[in-house]
Image (cartoon, rainbow, N blue to C red):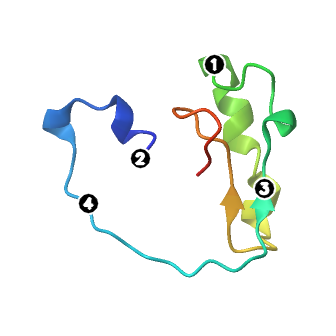
Amino acid sequence: MEIVTHLNPVFIPDFHLLVLDIPDTFQTVSLTDLPTDWQNDTHYETLQTYFSNWLAQPDVLTVSVPSAVVSRSGN
């Protein structure tokens, strides 16, 4: 949804709703874990590799991350 926010409505594809039952154990990334200006494009590569260890060997099913579009919200 973060990407769709910035798309021209003409290019938005059809979406399907998927409901998941997420376990209570998940990793949370808080704003204090990220660079101060993490929403700035200069941190793109840093943020892309932030979870490289987790992706290589995930120990939890899901990760909650701050929303780049809606402050005080998460994805």
Q: Which residue is at 63% across, 18% downward?
A: 40
Which is nearer the N-term, disc 1 or disc 2? 2
- Residue that label 2 marks: 1
**Quadrant of the image occupied by residue 6:** top left
**Quadrant of the image occupied by residue 23:** bottom right
The disc labelled 1 sits on which kind of residue?
Asn
* Residues under numbered marks 2 and 3 in contact, where contact means CB atoms less than 8 Å apart: no
Neighbourhood count class around disc 2 (C-alpha, 10 Å): few under 14, some 14–19, many 20 upward: few
Between label 3 and label 1, give the one nearer the viewer.
3
The disc labelled 2 sits on which kind of residue?
Met
Q: CA distance from mark 3 to mark 4?
A: 26 Å
Neighbourhood count class around disc 4 (C-alpha, 10 Å): few under 14, some 14–19, many 20 upward: few
Q: Which residue is at 69% across, 24% downward?
A: 43
Secondary structure at badge 3 equals strand
Which is nearer the N-term, disc 2 or disc 3? 2
The disc labelled 4 sits on which kind of residue?
Phe
- Residue that label 4 marks: 15
In the image: residue 3, left or right of residue 57: left
Secondary structure at badge 4 equals loop
The disc labelled 3 sits on which kind of residue?
Thr
Q: CA distance from mark 4 to mark 2?
A: 10 Å
Which is nearer the N-term, disc 3 or disc 1? 3
Residue 66 at x, y percent in the picture:
66, 42
Neighbourhood count class around disc 3 (C-alpha, 10 Å): few under 14, some 14–19, many 20 upward: some
- Residue that label 3 marks: 28
- Name the mark on residue 40: 1
Q: CA distance from mark 1 to mark 2?
A: 18 Å
